[in-house]
Image (spheres, helix red, strand yellow):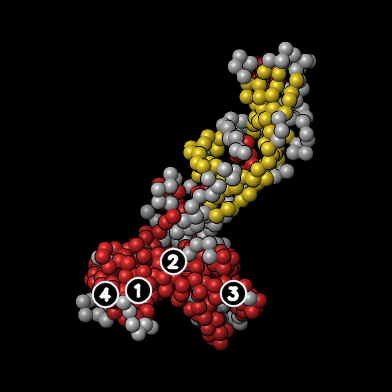
Amino acid sequence: MTIHLHPGDCWVADPHDDSLHPDLVLPEGFTLKGANPQNMTLRLFDTWTWSLWHAQRVLLGDGEHLFWLDREALGVVLMRLDGQAPPALASQMEGWPLEAEIGPLIDLRALMDGLNIEVRQRRWLLADAQGTGVAWALEHTWGEQVRTVQFFAMSGHNQRVDELLATLPQEQHRDQPPVAVALETFAKPRKWTTRPHTDMTHDDPAGPTIKRMMAATLALARLTEDGLCKDIDIKFLHHYRVLIRKTRSVLSLSKGVFEPEDTAELKIELRALAHRTNLMRDCDVHLLGRAEQEARVPERLRDGLGPLFEDLKATRDAEQRAIAAELRDPAYHQRIEAIAALIDGARLGPKADRPMGKLAAKLLTKALRQVLDAGRLINELTPDDDVHDLRLKCKKLRYLLELFRELYPRKALKPLIKSLKLLQDVLGTFNDRFVQQEALYTWLEGRQTLPTKVGVAVGVLLAQLAAEQLQARSQVQDAFALFDQPGLMDDLMAVTVLRREEPALA
C-alpha cells in the first residue's frame, strides 16, 4: 500500500466521524461511495538534529516507497524511490539516487526513524443522480488526531464541485496539502546547539550566572547520552565531549567567584568524565579516516591494514558498550546529579558579585593575549609541546568566545571566531596526525609478531602520517600570521564594551 501525496489545498474534519465530511451537503440524487480504507505507518526520516528539516527538505516512507519532498511544496514529490528505509549514513549512500542531495546535508549524522504517524487512507467517489462521476476525494486520518480531505473535480465538473465546496465552513479550509497539515501537527523539530543561551547581561552578577551557564552546558551534554548509548552516530560522542569540556571551561571563569575547594572538586569530576571517552574518540578518528589512511599506502599493501582496522573497530565497539553500560548505570546518574548539586551549591567567593560584562572582557582579552604571546614565539625550532600548548590556548579562547557571544550584538564576535577557526584547523590536523601515530605505535607494541605485509603497510602509513604532521607543523607559522592581524586586540576590546541591544560597530 502506497500513501497518495498530492499538491493543493484540503479541508479538515473530525477524525472520529465516519462520513467523508459531516458538513458536506450533497445535492439531491448525488451519491458518495467510499472504498475500503487502507492503514499504514508514515515514517519521517531525519537526523537527531533534524538536518533535512532545517534544510527545507523532508524524507518520508510508507513501508514500500520513500518520498523526497520540499518543505515549501510538500504536496509535490521531488523523487519517489522503492524501499522501506534509506541508508543511515552518508558513507553508505554511494550509488543511491539521493546521495548527492542528502549526503552533504547530514554529514556525519545518521538518518533515523524520527517520527511515526499511523495513517488511514480512503478514496471516495462522488456521482450525480445519473451515476456520472463528478469528483473523487482522498481522505487521510493522521494519528487519530486530525483528518484531511482533498477534492478533485473530474473533467467538466469544476463548477459543480466548487459550488459543493462552498457549502463547507471556511474555517475548516487549509491552504496547504494534507501531509503539510499532518507534519504541522506531529513534527517537533529539534533546534540543536552546543551553545547554551542563558539570557545573561553585562550587569548580571558573576556567581549566579556562571552557575547557570554550567548547569545549562551540563544539561545539554545529558541530552546526547541516549544517542551515545545507542551508538546512533559518532556526533553524539563528539557533542558529549565538547559540552563536558565547555562545562569545564565555564568553571575556569570561577577563580575568585567560587571558593577554591569547590572549584577544585568540580574540576576533578568533570575531567574524569571527559577522559573516560578518550579511547573511543581516538578509535573514531582512525576509523572515520579509513579511506584516507588506505590511500596513504600503495594499493598492493592496502589489505595489510585490514588487521589494524579490525582491531580498532573491535576496541572501539568494546569501549562504546562499556561506556553505554556506565551511562545507563544508576551510579552514573547519581554522579551527574551530584555534580549538578555541586554546581548549584558552590560557595560564592569574593568576586561573585562582579558584573559579567567586566568579567567577560577581562577573560576574553586575557585568553587572546595568551594565544598571541604563545603564537608569536613559534618558529622552526619550537618544540612540538609548545605547538600543542598553542592549540589548547586557542581552544580555550574559542570556548570563551562562544560562551560569551550572547552578551554582545549578533555577529559581533563572528570575524574573530572565523579567523580563529582557520588557525585551529591547522593545529587540529597537526594534533590528529600525532594522535594517529601514537595509536599505531600502541597497536604495534601490543603484538609480538606480525605478517610481513601488515608490518610494511603500517610502517608506510606511519611514515606518511609523520610527513603530514611535519607539513602541518610547517603551516602553523603562516596560519598564525593570518590570525595575528594588526589591531586584533583593540578590535576585541571594542566589542567587549558593546551590549547586545546595541548595533555592532561597522
Q: Which mark is residue 6?
A: none
Camera-nearest residue between 359 and 268: 268
Q: Amino acid type of disc 1? A: Gln
Instruction: Please identify, in this view, whether the residue under mark 4 or under mark 3 is nearer the observer.
Output: 4
Q: Amino acid type of disc 3? A: Ala
Q: Which mark is residue 436?
A: 1
Q: Mark 3 points at which residue?
A: 325
Q: Earlier in the sequence, mark 1 or mark 2?
A: 2
Name the residue rendered at 58%, 32% in the picture.
6
Task: Report helix, strand or loop for mark 4.
Answer: helix
Q: Mark 4 points at which residue?
A: 456
Distance, label 1 to label 2, CA atoms, is 29 Å
Task: Report helix, strand or loop for mark 3.
Answer: helix
Instruction: Tell me if residue 67 comes above or below residue 46 in the rendering.
Output: above
Q: Amino acid type of disc 4? A: Val
Distance, label 4 to label 1, CA atoms, is 17 Å
Instruction: Tell me if residue 51 comes above or below residue 197 in the rendering.
Output: above
Instruction: Tell me if residue 312 comes above or below residue 151 in the rendering.
Output: below
Q: Do the residues labelled 3 and 1 touch (CB within 8 Å)?
A: no
Find residue 192 and report its horizontal and vertical position in percent: 53, 58
Q: Amino acid type of disc 2? A: Leu
Q: Tell me: 267 left or right of 366.
A: right
Tell me if residue 383 can be seen: yes
